[in-house]
Amino acid sequence: MIKIGRSSNLSAQIVTYPTYGFQTDSLGWRIHIAGVAFQTAPPTLRQRMLVKMLGKTMKLDDESLRCEIFRDRVSPFLVEAEKGLEMQVTVGETTVPLRKRTRKNGHFFGAPRFHQSTISEVARTDEFGRQRVPYSISTVDGDRAVVEGVAHLIPPQGISVISDIDDTIKETRVVDRRELLINTFLRDFRSVSGMADVYRDWHANGAEFHYVSSSPWQLFDPLHKHQRDHGFPSGTMHLRNFRLRDQLLKRVMMIRRRGKATAIHRMLKDLPERKFILVGDSAEKDPEIYLKVWRRHPGQVSGIFIRDLQERPMIDERTRKLIQSSNGHSICTIFKDAETLARDATRIFSGFTAAHAVS
């Protein structure tokens, strides 16, 4: 479980996300690090106005605006970023500083290298034989509490699932603005029926999981809780950087139209020998994004699966364009429900299991 660290100043906080490590050679691993540093403070007048505007758009009464779930979900959007901090990562007894300070939005990232001996000393093996490495994040000056994280050690070969979150494994209704906001800020997160069962089966058959979403980092806690509570396999999490600067509603909506391709391309570049399954939905641009990924890494993408949503179905014209863009290859499969997904993906996992057994 990822913990939010707090320093002696209770308003200063650091969050880090579940991440992955990959081998650079026989003697070393790189671990991708990402997170955010911020401070909580009483909301400004402008922020209070934005919250009221949010409530008005959702058509909420004053009682709903005061409810615990709404306050918990909206409060991370009102924090103040801590920029210019020097961060460091510790694995075992080895501490490595990140090359860049936190950005204006408080985010930090890096991919420090650790020797194989350091990794071997602290690596933990789970019930499925997969290895995880605990690490900690702190500021170089020691002015913040140490924050614990976990890195999934991804073997050079194997199969990985890159999965969207909203409307792929969690019911969000992205295409309906009011429902999107209510599902995001006012309701308990609900899973897409049967998807956790399918993912657990894939996980048991050797797949690693990477949850790549357009959701802003401020939703990390409830998203991570949803993943655990609803039985989805543990995996890395890649969320959008987000800074409240202008209008909350406009930016929350716009952020979901921006691509997730950067994180996906980086992952495929880091793990060139692995095979990948990409799972998304028709509400946004997952089909188009995934096909671009496939064209760039055709030997690595074994299948693309798109959940066909009633609110934005894969109509004939859109499907035709996708087929044309894939040069007639049947790389992209449309599914309506989890049962269909499990059936259509059987060929991929059967082939992987057979090849794995031979090797």
Image: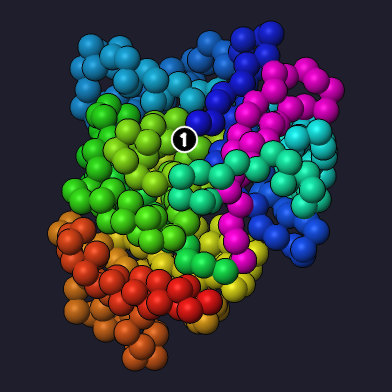
Q: How many numbered marks are there?
A: 1
Furthest residue toward bottom: 328
Residue 132 in magenta stretch: yes
Q: What stretch is highlighted in magenta?
A: 131-156
For this view, does 279 lie left or right of residue 295? left
- Of 216 and 353, which appears nearest the observer? 353
Residue type marked 1: Phe
**Camera-side residue: 200 or 95?**
200
Residue located at (41% from left, 67% from top) = 277
Provide the major secondary structure of the magenta segment. Answer: strand
Left or right of 94 on screen, residue 55: left
Q: Which residue is drawn at 32% across and 33% down?
A: 229
Which coloring applies here?
A: rainbow
The spot of residue 146 in percent (x, y) is 70, 23
Q: Splitting the image into 4 quarters, where does residue 143 fall?
A: top right
Q: Residue drawn at (24%, 13%), measured in percent from left and top?
A: 62
Position of residue 207 measured from the top left corner of the image (x, y, whole percent) = 44, 60
99 horizontally vs 168: left or right: right
**Mark 1 secondary-structure assignment:** helix
Residue 235 x, y percent position in the rendering:
47, 47
Verify whether residue 90 appears in magenta.
no
- State the image quarter where residue 95 is shown: top right
Left or right of residue 127, residue 111 in this image: right
Q: Which image quarter: residue 305?
A: bottom left
Where is residue 158 drawn, in percent x and y? 52, 67
The residue that label 1 is drawn on is 220
Foreground pick, 137 / 238: 137
Query: Is residue 322 positioned above or below 35 on the image?
Result: below
User: Is residue 356 among what the camera can see?
Assistant: yes
Q: Which residue is drawn at 61% across and 52% down?
A: 153
Does residue 240 appear in this view?
no
The crowd level at tag 1 (other Cα within 10 Å; few <14, some 14-19, many 20+) is: some
